[in-house]
Image (cartoon, rainbow, N blue to C red):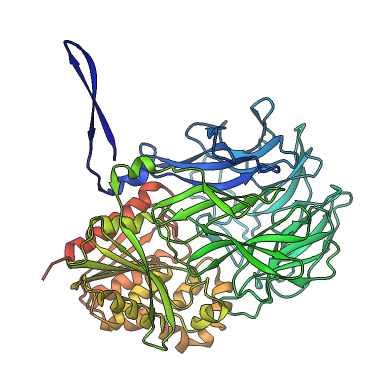
Amino acid sequence: MKKVLVFLFLSFGLFTLTIAQEKTNLELTDLFDLEYITSPSISPDGSKIVYVRNFKDIMTDRDYSNLWIVNADGTQNRPITQGNRRDYAPVWSHDGTKLAFLSNQQDDKVKLFVHYFDTNSSVALTNSANPPSAVSWSYDNQHLAFTQFVPAKPSSLLNIPSKPQGAEWNAAPIFIDEMVYRRDGGGYVSPGFRQIFTIDLTGGTARQRTFDENNYGSPVWSKDGNSLFFSANLHENAEFEPRNPEVYQLSLSDGSIKALTSRFGPDSNPTLSPDGKLIAFTGSDDTFQGYQVTHLYVMNVDGSGVKNLTADLDRDAGNPQWEANSQGIYFQYDEFGDTKVGHVSLNGKIRTLVEGLGGLDLGRPYNSGTYSLSANNRIAYTLGSPEHPADLAVWSGGNSTRLTALNDDVFSYRKIGKTEEIWWESSFDGRKVQGWIVTPPDFDPNKKYPFILEIHGGPFAMYGPSFAYEIQAYAAAGYVVLYTNPRGSTGYGQEFGNLIHHDYPNHDYEDLMSGVDAVIEKGYIDTANLFVTGGSGGGVLTAWIVGKTDRFKAAVVAKPVINWTSFVLHADNPVFFTKYWFGANPWEDIENYWRRSPLSLVGNVTTPTMLLTGERDFRTPISESEQYYAALKLQGVESAMVRIPNASHGLVNRPSMLMSKSASILSWFNHYRDKE
């Protein structure tokens, strides 16, 4: 409990009286007090961990982050950087004496810094207009490689006469001829490409190493320092085959580039073994399915001897990191709502070491997490749970230890809902479906509670047992919440994920309704007060649900797809959506596009429905919401539209956007709750 100190001055001295304050439910503005860690980076010897501590400022409505360092036993937890700024992406040098990181601490520009532990000082190595990213150290610890956007001169076929000197004309027309001309969160694409650079610790001008019209992935140094490995899609038809990057080797002496992989399908995340002889990477053979499991591969540094190490694991393998003896690889994967760290030997033997990674999505319970590995096989990772956002934990010799508790101050005076796992069988085909029930604080199973079904997006994504501000806000308002992983979710294997292949959102409906029924069977749900909401893919399913049933009192359809034809031609990646989610262009398969569109069911809708979308959403553009809003109004359905200014698809550009989203949903549901 939070302690309130009251000082009483009496004739015989000063006394301290401690009064216990009762805990109260979470409030929407508590979002600004929540913190979480990202990017745990353990030192090569495993003795120290640097991590990013993320926080929010209620006055500036901004997200900030600083670097902290702690001993692996949890002692001496202290800041390396401080202040309202963005310090992130820490990377230890191989000798453990230095730390590279990115920061805007000097001005608005993000620069590459190196922190020297012997002098406890940091030096900026770059001062470019565009921020560096994907930093890696050479093995002699004297050089750094990174990627950086290099602007190009806009090309245009338009021959526009010049305005007279002093004339006030409208801005010149913008000529666009690229397939992908805008990206969600980034806006309209500026001309230019992400190139590879290197820089010495002595500073000076960074040296550009690639110069063509391609975007290059994270560079990794060779053992001898003479080349860099990276992943990129350098094929001539990359614009129309976006899921076909290869692993390449760049010679620093002459700039030549050699392809080390050649199959059709994504090969990425190259990671060099400590002995410099092997490369681990992730990828798959592209079969144009909506969901394809990503495997972990290993090959010789010349590209020969490719071997799939996780062929027997029907889960996505990612974030490969070599053990010091080069005889095995650590990696992470998702399974049944949990994120885990596994280990695979070079002969393909797999074992699971760490569970409970998560806590990186503060808004909704997407179970994302990450880890880093030391030379003595100690693991630092983000520890998530339904009770708290990501904290720092360390695993060593089979034992895990939690090192931080960043939000104990908030939870000392705020109550949160409890999370319970639930499984049920789908009424469509009897398949097992997993979900989680969150009950309000001070829950009494003998009472009746209003109910919210909250649906994840993706659709190829995974919820899990994670703390989620939005879910806890609903519980604090007195609702029982069900969130779940219906068919199409990841973490259950390729077959389960592809049950929606070229059929989404058809049979997720039965999965979700069966889940609602399973919670109702517990006896504490007020069946006259059922509500439904979801964002992105969850918005698709929410609109689909109200077109199929009137059992819900009200609905909030957030950032949805309503009309698949308009969506695939207006979203930020038309090639991907048409090729992988439909297998044909809209004019080639009109019936399939229409039968899967929630707009086709709008004539059935009677549920009061609110639309909610960011005005700068280029993934599911707000025109989708506008279509549905107009259709609902024409149908005479009680409806409203909420537009979040300056917000892209994630609705988290600024903390107040996330708070406003949750507040808007609760306002709509509370308006109809108990209403006859």
Q: Residue at position x 83%, y 53% from top?
A: 275
Instruction: Residue lying at the far top in this picture: please name it.
Output: 11
Q: Decide if residue 64 is on the left or right side of residue 265.
A: left
| Image coords of residue 246 (percent x, y) | 74, 66
Instruction: Residue lying at the far left in this picture: please name it.
Output: 676
Classify residue 99 by image quadrant.
Answer: top right
Residue 346 seen anywhere in this rendered image of the structure: yes
Q: Decide if residue 9 is on the left or right side of residue 57.
A: left
Q: Nearer the viewer, residue 113 or 92?
A: 92
Query: Is residue 506 positioned above or below 326 on the image?
Result: below
| Count of marks overlaid on the render | 0
Q: Residue at position x 77%, y 31% from top?
A: 202
Q: Residue at position x 23%, y 80% from top?
A: 550
Query: Is residue 394 positioned above or below 529 on the image?
Result: above
**Which quarter of the figure is the N terminus placed in?**
top left
Classify residue 269 by image quadrant.
Answer: bottom right
| Image coords of residue 167 (percent x, y) | 51, 43
Instruction: Residue lying at the far right in this picture: please name it.
Output: 254
Query: Is residue 241 positioned above or below 357 on the image?
Result: below
Query: Is residue 23 positioned above or below 178 on the image?
Result: above
Q: Decide if residue 590 is on the left or right side of residue 23.
A: right
Q: Nearer the viewer, residue 543 or 101?
A: 101
Classify residue 108 by image quadrant.
Answer: top right
Q: Nearer the viewer, residue 551 or 446?
A: 446
**Which quarter of the figure is the C terminus placed in?**
bottom left
Q: Decide if residue 435 is on the left or right side of residue 49.
A: left
Residue 110 seen anywhere in this rendered image of the structure: no
| Image coords of residue 442 (percent x, y) | 23, 56
| Image coords of residue 612 (percent x, y) | 33, 62
